[in-house]
Amino acid sequence: MKPTAAFASSAPLAALLLTAGLLLTACDSTPRERQDAVENSTRKLDSLADKAGTALKRAGSRAARWDSVSKARTRQPLDTTAANAFMQELLGTYANVETLQVENLDPAYTQLLRQTRARRREWTQRDWDYATAVFKRLNARYRAIRLDLPARQELHIKALQAEFEGLEAGRDLKDLREAVRDKPAAK
C-alpha cells in the first residue's frame, strides 16, 4: 500500500475522531447552558439581520434617489452652444461629423476615445451627457456609411464604441456607489 493511500483512508477516521471529541466536550454543559447559548446566538443573528435590513433599505432609497436625479438630468435638453464646444473639444478636426467619410471615421472615433480617456476623471455627469451626445452623432454617421467600411476598420470602431460605453458605465457605477455608500457621521 502506498503511503498516500494509507493517509487517504485514515483521513475520514481522523475527522470522525475529531468530531466525536468536540461533541464529547460539548456534553460537559447543562441543557440550560446550551439553551442560553442558543438564545444568545439567535439574538445576535436577529440583531445582525436587522442591521443588514436597515442598511439595505437605506442603500435602496439612496440608489432610487440617484436614479431619479440621473433621469431628471438626462431629460434636460443640452445647451446647443455647449454641445458644439464639446464636439470641437472632443473631435477636433473631425467635429463636422456629418461630412466624415470612410477614410476619416476611424480616426474620429480614435480622437474621441483619446480625449475621453484624458478627461473622464474630471468630468461631471453633465459633461458625460455632452460626450454621449457627441458619441451618438458619431454613431449615426457610422450607421450611414457602415456598408462602405472595410471589415478591419469596422471591427476597430466597434472596439472603440465598446470602450466608450464601458468608460461611461464605469462612471455611472462609481457615482452610484458614492450615492449608496454610508457616509461617516459628521463630527
Image (spheres, helix red, strand yellow):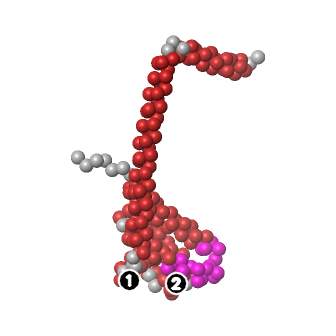
Name the spot of residue 74 as percent of width and height, x first.
Answer: 42, 72
The answer, for residue 149, to whether it is visible in the render is yes
Q: Secondary structure at mark 2?
A: loop
The reply to whether discs 2 and 1 touch (Cβ–Cβ < 8 Å) is no
Q: Amino acid at mark 1?
A: Thr
According to the image, label 2 marks what residue?
A: 100
Determine the residue located farthest toward the bottom in the rendered image. Answer: 99
Q: What is the count of numbered marks?
A: 2
Stretch in magenta: 137-154
Q: Cα distance, mark 2 to mark 1?
A: 21 Å
Name the spot of residue 162 as percent of width and height, x first.
Answer: 54, 66
Determine the residue located farthest toward the right in the rendered image. Answer: 1
- Category of crowding for the residue at label 1, using alpha-carbon neighbours closer than 10 angstroms: few (below 14), some (14–19), many (at least 20): few
Q: Nearer the viewer, residue 153 or 41?
A: 41
Name the spot of residue 146 as percent of width and height, x first.
Answer: 61, 79
Q: Residue at x 50, y 86 (%)?
A: 98
Q: Nearer the viewer, residue 88 or 176?
A: 176
Q: Amino acid at mark 2?
A: Leu
According to the image, label 1 marks what residue?
A: 80
Decide if residue 2 is on the left or right side of residue 123.
right
The answer, for residue 107, to whether it is visible in the render is no
Q: Residue at x 47, y 69 (%)?
A: 113
Q: Nearer the viewer, residue 58 or 108?
A: 58
Name the spot of residue 152 as percent of width and height, x first.
Answer: 62, 72
